[in-house]
Amino acid sequence: MDIDKITVIGGFARNGEKEPLEGIELHMGDVVSIVGPTGSGKTALINDIGLFADNNTPTQRRILINDAPPPATFREDPSKNPIALITQHTTFLSDLPVYKFLGLHARIRKTSRPESIVEETLDFANQLTGEPIITDSAMTELSGGQTRALLIADAVVIGNSPIILLDEIENAGIDRTRALELLRKYRKIFIFVTHDLRIALLSSYRLVMHEGAMQCVIVTEEEEKRMAEKFKTLDEVMLYFRNQIRAGERLSEEELRKRLQLAQSFLLGEEIP
Ligand SMILES: Nc1ncnc2c1ncn2[C@@H]1O[C@H](COP(=O)(O)OP(=O)(O)O)[C@@H](O)[C@H]1O
Ligand SMILES: [Mg+2]
């Protein structure tokens, strides 16, 4: 079944009132962020989507796929489930070496090119994480960042899931900008729960949560897209010093001054017509 859209039919906020947003449609190709303070119901919302909620969760929401209730096979047969949910707590339970695990998954998925798809998955994962994955190491030996990177790559490439839900992966050692760039090449619905400025601004739109309810949708217009580019320049200054720390170096104010001046002339230079 080709998935064109997911509909979330609104339910009730935590206080029992109807959600301000009656519903929302997510279309194939959309990159969506879900934003809101801690406790505002972000995880509950993506769990609703992941479970194909049908009035049977605390929020009373309902999920439709292509305007209809999802077929039972989505819930019953893991190989037919179109949704991959990746959270901070998701881990691999297998202690197989990385290449064996991926090869096994590729065969279960009956892919026509088991070898090249494993390569592609590893390559993808390695672009997401700063610490290259050694393919002989056991899955259980991977760091948090490597695990998250491999889970995403596995879901996108081998799992070929059309809908990918990511719950606050930003603290897990993933290169967020790179991830967005790479993910956009695959035609899927990506839903990020995020507090990250750049992930939010690189999304097509963001859904605002408050007190357990969907409040509104903010579409990323040109002004915010231009700002995303500038935040990237500022991020790079921070990244430079973070890497200095990691490399065991001392930081210098002189270097900071130089880098800020460069960033400033670049940022302001762009603004003068
Ligand atoms: N609409 C709702 N109705 C009832 N309980 C809700 C609703 N939305 C969220 N909750 C509950 O509120 C708590 C916090 O929500 P959660 O989704 O974990 O917030 P966040 O991920 O934004 O920090 C959870 O226990 C969740 O089950
Ligand atoms: Mg949460």
Image: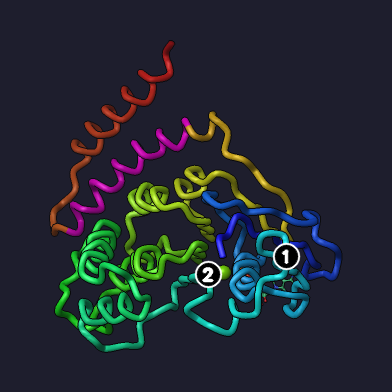
* Residue 105, numbered label: none
Query: Which residue occupies the foreground of this view, 13 or 78?
Result: 78
Q: Is residue 179 visible?
A: yes
* Residue 83, numbered label: 2
Q: Residue beneath label 1, please?
A: 68
Sequence-wise, the earlier of marks 1 and 2 is 1
Instruction: For marks 1 and 2, give the CA distance.
Output: 16 Å
Decide whether the magenta segment is chiefly helix, strand or loop: helix
Secondary structure under the numbered disc 1 in the rendered image: loop
The amino acid type of the residue labelled 2 equals Ile
User: Residue 75: percent from the left, percent from the top?
Assistant: 60, 80
The residue at 28%/69% (across/down) is: 146
Magenta highlight on residue 207: no
**Disc 2 within 8 angstroms of ligand 1 (CB):** no
Give the magenta part as a residue range: 226-246
Magenta highlight on residue 244: yes
